Amino acid sequence: NSRYASATSFPLAPSPGRTRSWLTDSPLTLPPTVRLPQAVVFDMDGLLLDSERLAMATFQQACRESGFEPAMAVYQRCIGSTYEATESLMREGFGAGFPFDAVAARWSAIYDQHIQTQAVARKPGAREILQCLTAAEIPMALATSTHRRNAEVKLRLAGLDHFFRTTVCGGEARRGKPHPDPYLLACERLGTSPADCWALEDSMNGTRAALT
């Protein structure tokens, strides 16, 4: 069973002068079992920021510079997971000949150089939904596998850093995604029961974390 309240679609902009009631103005009828959330916890990479394509491209570049052509099906299984889980999945999936240490170091260098100097593009509608939830006075948190230094830079350069009441970053929860710990810690910091929150995710590992 899910720890989190179910989510549904709602309009991206409130009417002038409205707060919470605009959420019920959607032309879609909310199912009777769906309750509006007391808080919303967001993933970051791939959901709010179009960073997954950058991560994939820099991973492929690092592999090829190390003389290895990766099977991307293995990479796909790593999306949304922690560094430790990614290492385990890649070593197992790519086999003994995969130069993980060299690839990881080069991948991190290329990726970090990009995000420290250039804003990662926001996903369509990302800023708008954050603005709407702010107008509706629904608190928000972030639960990401990205370590804090990079997460804060990406949010700041994308202009999204001021929306979140709290952020849980990679390595800060006892266990990372796909375990539920990052989401549970975010709810704890918000002072809200997980049953009263919505969790928004784009990856299978993140969805498993939110639903466990």
Image (cartoon, rainbow, N blue to C red):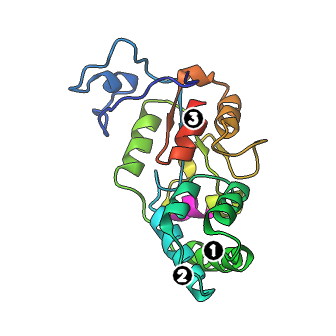
Q: Which mark is residue 210?
A: 3
The kind of residue tagged 1 is Asp
Q: Is residue 40 left or right of residue 113?
A: left
Residue displayed at 39% across by 27% down: 19
The residue most toward the top is 32
Question: Which amino acid is tagged 3?
Answer: Ala
Q: Is residue 140 at least partly visible in the picture? A: no
Between 119 and 97, the one lying in front of the other is 97
What amino acid type is highlighted by mark number 2? Gln
Residue 30: image x %, image y %? 31, 19
Mark 2 or mark 1, which is nearer the start of the sequence?
Answer: 2
* Disc 3 to disc 2: CB gap under 8 Å: no
Q: Which residue is mark 1?
A: 112
Q: Position of residue 195 (x, y in %)?
A: 57, 20
Q: Does 16 sit above or below residue 54?
A: above
Of labels 3 and 2, earlier in sequence is: 2
Q: Main secondary structure of the magenta part?
A: helix
Measure the alpha-carbon separation of dots 3 and 2: 32 Å
Residue 154 among magenta residues: yes
Classify the position of the N terminus by image quarter. Answer: top right
- Residue furthest toward the left? 27
Give the magenta range: 153-157
Closest to the observer: 74 or 193? 74
Q: Which residue appears at 35% of the width and 21% of the height? A: 21
